[in-house]
Amino acid sequence: MNMSNFVGMFSSVFVTVAMVAQMSGRAYAAPAPEPAQGATMRVNLGRDVTLEVVYIPPGEFKMGSTAAEKAWATGIEGGATPGTERESYEGATPRLMRVKDGFWMGRTEVSVGQFRRFADESGYVTDAEKPGGHTQVFDPDWTITAKAPPHPWISVEGKSWRDPNFAFPLQSSFPVVCVSWNDARAFCEWLTKNEREAGRLPAGLVYRLPAETEWEYACRGGRESTAFWWGDDLKDGEGRLNISAIDFLPGRNKTWPLGKAPWSDGFAFVSPVDQYKENGRNGFGLADMCGGVWEVVLDHFDPKGGHEELYVVTTNPRPVCRGGNYFDVPGNARCAVRLGLRGPTYSDSRDGFRICLGVPKG
């Protein structure tokens, strides 16, 4: 789509149409119709790099999970560790939540190529790249032994989104990882500034991270409350997501330890964004909402569960991440799963982000 068509589509969706008429002796302005669910726009980042967003209308869903879902997650098939407090972070029971404003969300997580475009144009330096910075990455010397921990991740300096220490070449189509909550917000601020200066961003809207309520509502894809966006049955997830499955680690004849999906998803580490195409998109048309990489959101972490309104704290901020990642067992890659990062500067080769376009929050 060329730029003039893009601007025309953007304007037809958002910009108030000046329709002046007399009603009770007063002039009024009639707003343009709300976009249709699933409407898409392609944002031009420059240098032939684009980013696609999908419209999601207001609606309701139930946030959290049932006792039965938690029991499945920590059972044989789910594979999550039983007896910990992790599942309690989802809340005691599912709670009805309302998303009052429609918004646009990235079809996929932000990719390496898209983030590179931002870094190249703005000169931005991520938290991991700053002096003394570090990030959590895979340990290439890790071996599975009876005494070794099951999580082969180490914190190192000198690694970043430019080199996440994967045992294979980085691709522009991979989701960007090793970026912090601060870095993700900086990307959104850059995109907002660029689009506003180009006259393509309507007043009152910004690019930002999604709020936690928006994220889970979007993840469920129009379903009120199920374990995954396609339903409750794990076997129906084959060919839809990238999680711990029957895939050999690079250069090894072993898979990830612990529980796993009983099929190959094609990737032991990250898969390219939207790798599974239509089969990997939920009812709203969003790809990779479960598995892939963790996605950070605007809210700070409340261990008692998520909130309908944006939740922030002034001390010890711990951003929420959602959705699970390529290393996770099935029980840790459900719609309701949520964790808190160590802080706004923390980054990890399992963590990325997805953008939202909507009314300002936070």
Image (cartoon, grey):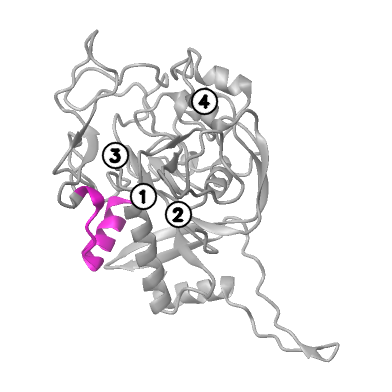
Residue 181 badge: 1
Q: Nearer the viewer, residue 233 or 103?
A: 103
From this viewpoint, which residue is outermost toward the front? 315
Q: CA distance from mark 1 to mark 2?
A: 9 Å
Q: Quadrant of residue 49?
A: bottom left
Residue placed at 21% from the left, 65% from the top?
A: 123
Residue drawn where x is 36% and y is 72% of the image: 194
- Residue hosting label 3: 348
N-term-proximal mark, 4 vs 3: 4
Left or right side of 144 for 38: right
The type of residue carrying mark 3 is Asp
Measured Cα–Cα span from mark 2 to mark 4: 24 Å
Determine whether, in the image, residue 246 is placed left or right of residue 237.
left
Going from N to C along the chain, the mark reached first, 1 or 2, is 1
Q: Secondary structure at mark 1?
A: helix
Q: Which mark is residue 209?
A: 2
Most prominent secondary structure in the magenta stretch? Answer: helix
Left/right placement of residue 82 relative to residue 62 reads left
Contact (CB < 8 A) between labels 1 and 2? Answer: yes
* Total count of labels: 4
Instruction: Please identify the quarter of the rendering in which residue 81 is found.
Output: top left
Q: Is residue 212 left or right of residue 248?
A: right
**Mark pair 4, 1: CA separation:** 23 Å
Query: Quick check: is 340 in the magenta stretch?
Result: no
